Amino acid sequence: MTCLPRRLAGFEVVSRRNKFKAGYMVDRDSLLEKLQQIQVAIKNNYKSNKNIGVLSGISGIALFQYYYSKFLKKQDPADLGAEIIYEVVKRINNGYLFPTFCTGIAGAGWVLDLLQEENYIEVNNDSLLPQLDDYLFEIMENDVKNQHFDFLHGALGYGYYFLKRYENTQSEKLKKKYREKLIFLLLALKNSAKKGNNRIWWEYELNAKEKIYGANLSLSHGMSSIVIFLCKLHPYDDFKKLTKDLLIGSVTYILKARYKDVHSTSLYPSWIYKKDNHYENTRLAWCYGDLGVGLSIYHTAKTLRNTEYKKIALQIFKHSAKRRDYQETRICDAGLCHGVYGIVAIFKYIFTETKETIFKEALEFWINEAVTMAVHEDGYAGYKQWRGDDEQWENKTNLLEGVAGIGLAIITYLAPFETHWEECLLIK
């Protein structure tokens, strides 16, 4: 693979106009203190993270630095962000090859495009990033062949990178290439989909050891991420024809999967692997559960201008807003993936969209809870990630599970400007 240039152009922090007023802030001083502590933890520890992706690697940590710089109206955090981006390029030049959106090169490329889009950096991505495209497409082709459409670790993540490039490239030649890559992925989704009763779904390996296959509805790895990806493609004429039927069919499948018992705590299962799918309580989180399903239905409603879908999505969010018991919601830590700040980020988005009081109350409840979870004396800003597999706490700097993501959620809660980092989690 051709190495990337070793130098990027200068970095510049810019301002944006206010899109909303955060007049409902809770214990602002505690949150500001957390941001300072997170900044110190990242500065001292980010190099220990050996990956470069947006969610699990250091490029996502750079996002925190740039947004924090804008929030403080100070240059120092952005300077550290630039240092981290240089480290990303250095690692690729030195042979880093892990490709995925979550952990590797596709995610890092996505970050570079977002930073340019937000006017945080000045860099010629049309010269820099195409050097990676053939390699990433080759990996995507292999994942498509294996019907591995995982957002974090598979074909959908590469597609998400190519979509960002399609949107931001200034070259018509490159735009055509990205269009072809995205159409390839859309056709693969269409050809691999299961169909029946006006429904469309994809079969996933739910348990490799026991060879259990079925539909995964999650936002992190399953159909909710596919639905939102289709929503992001649909507005473009290049993809409208291919996405519409897939979008309607897959949303129909998800809606039909709702539990029959109207009094159930969870409204939707995480996965479906037999016709008589029994009730299992799903967590309240970004990764799995009703919040991800709600986002997929809400984005479809906006994309197709469907008022019935919007009504259903808001019902899902209102039901979720009433869930506050830790044992029932299965919350263990504070991180974005399966912790409290992921809930905060989603309710922040939905409240901003709707201005409905119930979402403001849920947001305030969970941001207060998030502050109280900073109890680890040896944790970064008091936070650690709970690793359930080996039942231990771990310090993490990254966006998905660590303090960079916690910091970004706090900034979005406090800031008088609109943020777009949430796109990497398909929230926006």
Image: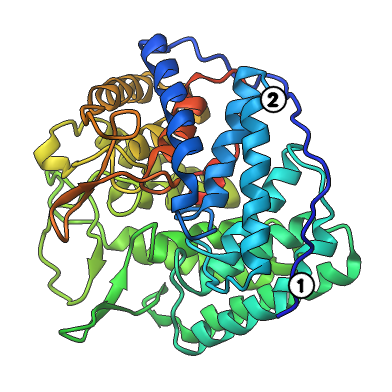
45 to the left or right of 230: left
Residue 406 seen by the camera: yes
Vertical relation: 212 (above or below) 86: below
Relative to the observer, which residue lies in front, 216 or 104?
A: 104
**Labels 1 & 2 near each other (Cβ < 8 A):** no
- For numbered disc 1, what is the local secondary structure? helix
- For numbered disc 2, what is the local secondary structure? loop
Relative to the observer, which residue lies in front, 334 or 150?
A: 334
Relative to the observer, which residue lies in front, 116 or 62?
A: 62
Which quadrant does the N terminus fall into? bottom right
Q: Position of residue 351 (x, y in %)?
A: 45, 27
The residue at 41%/17% (across/down) is: 33
Q: Which residue is mark 2?
A: 75
Alpha carbon of mark 1 to alpha carbon of mark 2: how far? 30 Å
279 to the left or right of 229: left
The residue at 60%/81% (across/down) is: 187
- Displayed quadrant of residue 16: top right
Q: Nearer the viewer, mark 1 or mark 2?
A: 2
Q: Position of residue 59 (x, y in %)?
A: 57, 51
The residue at 78%/33% (across/down) is: 12
5 to the left or right of 200: right
Q: Position of residue 112 (x, y in %)?
A: 69, 52
- Displayed quadrant of residue 222: bottom left
Task: Name the N-terminal-most of marks 1 and 2.
Answer: 2
Which quadrant does the C terminus fall into? top right
The residue at 54%/36% (across/down) is: 64
Dot 2 amino acid type: Gln
- Displayed quadrant of residue 159: bottom right
Vertical relation: 424 (above or below) 95: above
Q: Which residue is mark 1?
A: 131
Numbered disc total: 2
